[in-house]
Amino acid sequence: MATTLDLGTMTTVEKLRLMEDLWQSLSADGQKLDSPDWHGDVLAERDRLIESGEEKYVDWEIAKKQLRTELQ
């Protein structure tokens, strides 16, 4: 079944709802998808940066507030 959507005419709210619906459908599907190998490489590099002090974690609640402020 093919479905065509005109994303250019959809509002941001409609697009977000569509993404949520897609994610819910994919997550509900019992099929397990393996992560590609490069995901492990990215995670290992992030761990290295954290351990070396080059990067740091930001609390999720603080990060959300910062993003909301930047996007206003």
Image: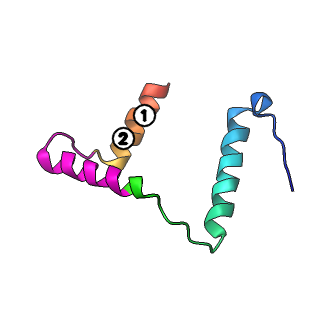
In the visual, does 24 lie left or right of 41?
A: right
Mark identifier at residue 67: 1
Q: Magenta span covers which residues?
A: 40-57
User: Most prominent secondary structure in the magenta stretch?
Assistant: helix
Q: Quadrant of residue 55?
A: top left
Q: Position of residue 62 (x, y in %)?
A: 34, 42
Residue furthest out toward the bottom: 30
- Determine the residue positioned at 69% across, 47% down: 17
Crowd around label 2: few <14 · some 14–19 · many ≥20 (10 Å): few
Q: Quadrant of the N terminus?
A: bottom right
Furthest residue toward front: 37
Are the residues at dot 2 and dot 1 in contact (C-beta closer than 8 Å)? Answer: yes
In the image, 70 versus 40, the foreground residue is: 40
Residue drawn at x 65%, y 62% is 26
Q: Quadrant of residue 9?
A: top right
Residue 63: image tag: 2
Q: Nearer the viewer, residue 62 or 56?
A: 56
Which residue lies at the image location 49% right of the left edge and 27% below the top edge? 71
Amino acid found under the numbered disc labelled 2: Ala
Residue 51: image x %, image y %?
15, 51
